[in-house]
Amino acid sequence: MDKKKNSRRDFLKTSSLAIAGVAAPHIVPVSVFGKTAPSNQINVGMIGTGRQAVLVNLKEGFLTLGNCRVLAVNDADAWRMNYAAEEIKKSYSANKKGPVEVRQYDDYRKLIGDKDIDAVMISTTDHWHAPAAIAAALAGKHVSMEKAFTVAPAWGRAVVEAVKKTGVINRIDSEFRSLRPFNRAVELVHNGAIGELTHVDVGVPGELNGSAPGPQPTMPVPEELNYDMWLGPAFPSPYTLKRVHDPKKINGRPGWMRISDYCNGMITNWGAHLLDIALWGMKKDGVAPVAVKGKGVFDTGLWNTLSAFDLQYTFTDGMTMNYAIDVPFVKFNGKDGWIRIEYPDKLTAGSPDILNYKPKVSYADTKTDKADFLSSIETGKPTIEPLSVGYNVYLTSVMGLYAAQLGSALYWDAQKQEFINDNAANALLTRPFRTKWIDNNVIEWMNARQDMYRRG
């Protein structure tokens, strides 16, 4: 690190480091230090190095971009952390990107404490997203956070308030707005190709890793896994393979994605993509539904998340949305026709004229999720999908989860951020958490938001 780079990073640290009670900082864009400044290489730290982190966020994301350097990795699984580090080294060596250094940290807090790290990519289990994101924001690190957002609305609200308070650049890591067939569908809706929007249908695929298993035996913890840290904010449970992930493998969907202690299931996982497109098309990025009703089927046993659901949402303007297990798609219904986009790229409409419509405003140049995040760090401008947008998508999805879980219609008060006259539903907005592996300032931040929900 040369003197110029150190002085800039020290300046950014003192101007963006924040703790509760400190005024929002002034984030200085990288560009003000000159195009040739070493600071144009944004140093990224990876918190979580599993399947999504390595195969997507690294290989298809940060390792393909010239304005960043993945400098550090962290995971509770040492084998996965080492694997990610070697993949980074191989990529940079092949591209002759100078001396290869990949710092490995066995504790996410050590990575966040590294003064050379500018930004973090959080790709952990869902139940770790909020503590890690809050810790990073309070340390002045820019935050990109994998979907699904978290496991409880109070935790999600704490994340949104932390990045807002500290002023760090932030983004929910969903790539669907960057996929041309999806942003083309929204582009047509926003340009009036189907007239006034009235109703939206959304489908997400069913569980992708097979049927729920029967009772599982307690197994020895793999030597490379710090299982207690992996559990983190979740309370202790005996180790078994289908609770966590396959040892010494990077492919395959892990069992934790279907266990409510660590994830809300497919309703929030794929919902983070397709509900996001639906709400974007409806121009409701920050608008939650006012009512939801429907039904669902839950797995029982070790895997216990929703395996099937059919939900109906209503918004203040009367617009409605149906959300169900189906093929992955979004269908926009307007007074003058309809547009349907099915993953990955099947775009259809009620008439050829709709697909041939020439928009005045185009989304064809939408940046990829990682490029958008890095560009915002350079310019100081907000990302396309800040965490506040990701939180609204998450809140929408779990409102449906709670309606299915409780078997009753729910009504939302946006001003109070609570369900109307429903103590059972409001109790689900918070979640107790274990404080081990979480620093006191983050504990205080999370507890304050939980208390806020409890007070209504």
Image: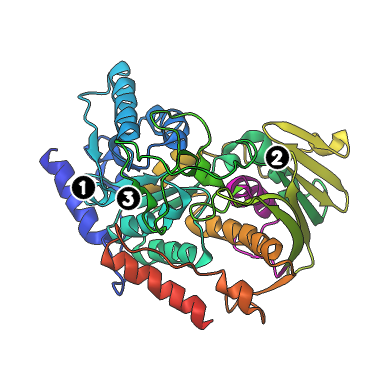
Tag 2 secondary structure:
loop
- Disc sitting over residue 229 in the figure: 3
| Distance CA(mark 3)–CA(mark 2) | 34 Å
Residue occupied by mark 1: 114
Which amino acid type is shown beneath numbered disc 1? Asp
The N terminus is located in which quarter? top left
Q: Position of residue 173 (x, y in %)?
A: 49, 45
**Magenta span of residues:** 266-291
Work out whether residue 142 can be spotted. yes
Q: Earlier in the sequence, mark 3 or mark 2?
A: 3
Which amino acid type is shown beneath numbered disc 2? Pro
Judge whether 326 appears above or below 130 on screen: above
- Disc sitting over residue 323 in the figure: none
Rendering quarter of residue 101: top left
Labelled pair 3, 2 in contact (Cβ < 8 Å): no
- Residue in the picture at 73% in, 55% down: 296
Residue occupied by mark 2: 328
Q: Position of residue 44 (x, y in %)?
A: 31, 41
Which amino acid type is shown beneath numbered disc 3? Met
Q: Position of residue 97 (x, y in %)?
A: 27, 23
10 Å crowding of disc 1: few (<14), some (14-19), many (20+): some
Residue 282 inside the magenta-drawn segment: yes
| Distance CA(mark 3)–CA(mark 1) | 20 Å
Q: Nearer the viewer, mark 3 or mark 1?
A: 3
